[in-house]
Image (cartoon, rainbow, N blue to C red):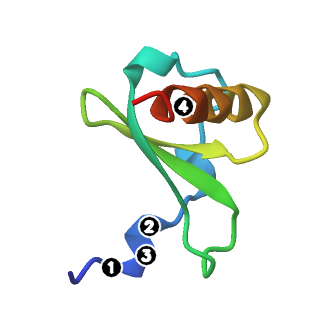
Amino acid sequence: SVRSPYGACCYKEMFVRQKIPAFLIRSYQKTPSHCSRKAVRVELLKGKKFCVDWEEGWFQQYRQQQKSTSTST
């Protein structure tokens, strides 16, 4: 696929500070290593995309929950 590597990175103005409720999140993806900021691109159910700091406390909790729910299938 010919995705521009530019689009995969997160930039300052794309970051959200507030917690995104788990039920609104469709998927998330870590930014590639060539990006200047280590972050996660979060896609919401409505198709909106935001960036979240990987170290963000609520996101860490969200990831833990995702892990524990995905193993039960």
Q: Is residue 23 left or right of residue 53?
A: left
Find out whether the residues at labels 4 and 3 contact each other: C-beta distance under 8 Å: no
Q: For marks 1 and 3, give the CA distance.
A: 5 Å
Looking at the rendered structure, the kind of residue marked 2 is Ala
User: Which residue appears at 62% of the width and 28% of the height?
Assistant: 62
> Where is residue 55 shown, x and y percent of the image?
79, 44
Q: Nearer the viewer, residue 64 or 42?
A: 64
Looking at the rendered structure, the kind of residue marked 4 is Gln
Find out whether the residues at labels 2 and 3 contact each other: C-beta distance under 8 Å: yes
Which residue is label 3 attached to? Answer: 6
Q: Which mark is residue 8?
A: 2
Find out whether the residues at labels 1 and 3 contact each other: C-beta distance under 8 Å: yes
User: Which residue appears at 57% of the width and 48% of the height?
Assistant: 13
Tell me how many marks there are: 4
2 to 53, vertically: above or below: below
- Classed neighbour count for the residue bearing mark 4: other residues with Cα under 10 Å, few (<14), some (14–19), many (≥20): few
Q: For marks 4 and 1, give the CA distance.
A: 28 Å
> Where is residue 19 shown, x and y percent of the image?
63, 21
Q: For marks 2 and 1, give the CA distance.
A: 7 Å
Q: Which mark is residue 66?
A: 4
Q: Quadrant where the N terminus lies?
A: bottom left
Which residue is label 1 attached to? Answer: 4
Which label sits in the foreground, 4 or 3? 4
Which label sits in the foreground, 4 or 2? 4
